[in-house]
Structures are given as C-alpha cells and as structure tokens.
Image (cartoon, rainbow, N blue to C red):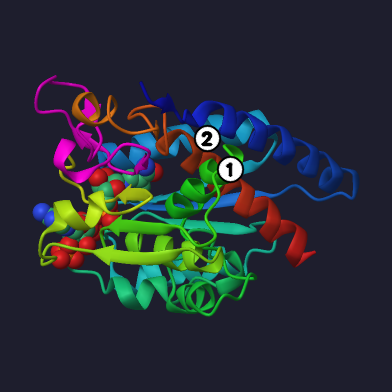
C-alpha cells in the first residue's frame, strides 16, 4: 500500500510560516494584500476565490476582489489592471482566465507588473522562471508540487522524472522547477508515442493532463512516486472530482502518491498567499 502524500500537513506548515511573516510585516506597518481581478462569475473561479478569501483571512493577508461583468470592454479592463497594478497597497495580482472571447487576453495579462505577478500570468514572469531567476514567481500549482516533494523529503537530484502535460500553467514550469533541482526531466503530451512506457520508466511521475483517471496501472511501476495534479469531474461519482490518475488501480503498485482531493489542490491556494507575502517583503 502506498504512502499518501497528503497536502494538508504541507499547507498547515506553510500557513504557520506565512502567519509569522505577516506578523513581522505588520509590525513594520505593512499588510500584504492580494488583488483578484474577475470578469464574470464562472463557478470554478468563484470556488477558488472563496478558498483564497478564507485562507487569506486565516493567515492575515488582506484580500480585495475587482469584479466586472462579462460585457466589460477592452479599454475599461485595461484601465482596471493598470489601476490595480499601480495601487501600492496591493502586492500580488491574480487575474482569472480565460477572459471572455471579445477581450485581448494577451494584452491584458501583459499589464500586470511582473513584481506583482504572483501566479506567472505574464511573459516577463514566465521568462524569469525559465531563466532560473528566483525573483520570478512560478505558477502556484507546480510550486505547490515542489513544496509537497520538499516536505516529504523526496530526493530529486539525478532522478528520472516524467511530466505528462506541457501547458504554461503546469507542465512546462513544473519541468523547469524540477530541472533546477537537477532532475532528468521528460515532458510528455498528446503526441507522445508509447506514453505508458515512458511514464512507467520514471522514478517520479507528475500527471497534469486534464483527463479523469487516464494514468492507469500500465503507466506506473513498483517503487515509483506519483504526483497527481488533475482536477476533473469524476465520471464514476457524479458531483465528486478525481485526478488524472486512476488512484484505485495505481495506489497498490507505487510507493507514494498524492490523493485527489486532498493533495496538490490543497496546497495551491496557500502557495498564492506565500507568493503574495514574498512580493510584499520584496517590494518594501
Ligand atoms: P491543459 O492546458 O489542458 O494541458 C493538458 C496537457 O495534457 C497538454 O499539454 C496536452 O497535450 C496533454 N494531454 C492531453 N491529453 C493527453 C493524452 N491523451 N496523452 C498525453 N498528454 C495529453 O491543462 P492544464 O491547465 O495544464 O491542467 C492539467 C490538469 O491539472 C487539469 O486536470 C487541471 O484541472 C489540473 N489543474 C490543477 C490545479 C491544482 O491546483 N491542483 C491547477 C491547475 C490545473 P498537448 O499539449 O499535446 O495538447
């Protein structure tokens, strides 16, 4: 039976550290603040926003939502992002994406100041991550995976690690963060040949595919460590969600595995606040 790499102990340890850092900032008259820019009311965005609000309150980070209707125009939204960017009381910005089709998202993202880009939404932020410039904030999800690996003392140096998924939000930055730790990284995608064999050859497998339970028993081997980034509607349990890994099939084979729910997702929100606190420390 595999060890469950639960996210909660990781998130709790991080919250303790963040709370201390917030107290130190408050003693200097500074309160770290996250500004969330939301267009429309997508239920997934609202759910994430609710989680950020609750966690922010718990650790003492201030929180403000800039909410706009789906019919907002390009110029108006550009002004919102510029104003939030120029507001010195706001240290970190999260822009919910994708934006409605009539908006030029690339142009709007580019207006977020890189030093406030706490979820890597700008090309400047991504450039820093790919150039190993530690002043850049990688996206919160791959950073959450790295926190989990660190918390559970999983060695990365020289390990063969396969990442399934090459998005700019998870797969690619994940690979960069693993490379920083001297892992040997293979990035897979929808055109990878013999994906199951490539996955099964790895010491550590990171699944960021967006397909419910796709990674089954043929994709893993005994001794392996599996990090499941996926959040999908569970086809077998309506109203519940599941990962990209078929947990029931894989868990008896591997050594360690993150559950879904209760794994990577539970660390991601805390990561956003950690980045916001670091941004506040750096900006001041
Ligand atoms: P995405 O942008 O849709 O990217 C999915 C990646 O998986 C793509 O690179 C795609 O390859 C690859 N892929 C799709 N089908 C495949 C297949 N059959 N075989 C091999 N590769 C395949 O998704 P994402 O935004 O990176 O998110 C990935 C997963 O993480 C989703 O389940 C999402 O809900 C979850 N997520 C979780 C968190 C969290 O906090 N836990 C945060 C963000 C995302 P191509 O590039 O070739 O199309």
Q: Which quarter of the frame holds ligand 1? A: bottom left
Residue under the image location 54 percent in, 29 percent down: 54
Quadrant into which the N terminus falls:
top left
Mark 2 CB near ligand 1 (8 Å cut): no
Q: Relative to 166, is 65 above or below?
A: above
Residue under the image location 52 percent in, 35 percent down: 53
User: From mark 1 to mark 2, how far is it between C-alphas?
Assistant: 7 Å
Give the side of residue 23 with respect to residue 208, left or right: right
Residue 284: quadrant of the picture: bottom right
| Front residue of 87 and 266 | 266
Look at mark 2 in the image and give the residue it sits on: 53
Span of residues in magenta = 217-246
Can you see residue 43?
Answer: yes
Residue under the image location 58 percent in, 43 percent down: 63
| Front residue of 43 and 250 | 250
Look at mark 1 in the image and give the residue it sits on: 63
């Amino acid at each position: 039976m595999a060890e469950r790499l639960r996210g909660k102990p990781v998130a709790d340890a991080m919250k303790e550290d963040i709370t201390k850092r917030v107290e130190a900032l408050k003693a200097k008259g500074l309160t770290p603040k996250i500004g969330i820019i939301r267009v429309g009311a997508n239920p997934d965005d609202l759910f994430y926003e609710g989680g950020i609000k609750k966690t922010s309150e718990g650790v003492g980070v201030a929180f403000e939502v800039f909410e706009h209707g789906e019919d907002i125009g390009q110029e108006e939204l550009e002004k919102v992002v510029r104003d939030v960017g120029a507001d010195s009381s706001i240290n970190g910005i999260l822009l919910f994406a994708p934006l409605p089709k009539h908006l030029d998202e690339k142009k709007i993202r580019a207006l977020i100041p890189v030093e406030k880009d706490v979820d890597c939404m700008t090309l400047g932020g991504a450039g820093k991550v790919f150039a190993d410039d530690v002043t850049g904030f990688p996206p919160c999800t791959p950073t959450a995976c790295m926190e989990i690996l660190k918390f559970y003392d999983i060695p990365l140096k020289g390990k063969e690690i396969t990442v399934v998924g090459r998005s700019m939000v998870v797969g690619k930055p994940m690979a960069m963060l693993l490379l920083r730790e001297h892992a040997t990284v293979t990035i897979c995608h929808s055109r990878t040949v013999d994906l199951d064999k490539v996955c099964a050859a790895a010491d550590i497998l990171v699944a960021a595919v967006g397909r419910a339970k796709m990674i089954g028993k043929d994709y893993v081997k005994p001794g392996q460590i599996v990090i499941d980034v996926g959040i999908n509607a569970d086809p077998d349990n309506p109203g519940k969600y599941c990962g990209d890994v078929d947990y029931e099939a894989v868990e008896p084979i591997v050594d360690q595995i993150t559950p879904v729910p209760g794994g990577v997702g539970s660390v991601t929100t805390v990561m956003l606040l950690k980045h916001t606190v670091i941004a506040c420390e750096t900006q001041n």
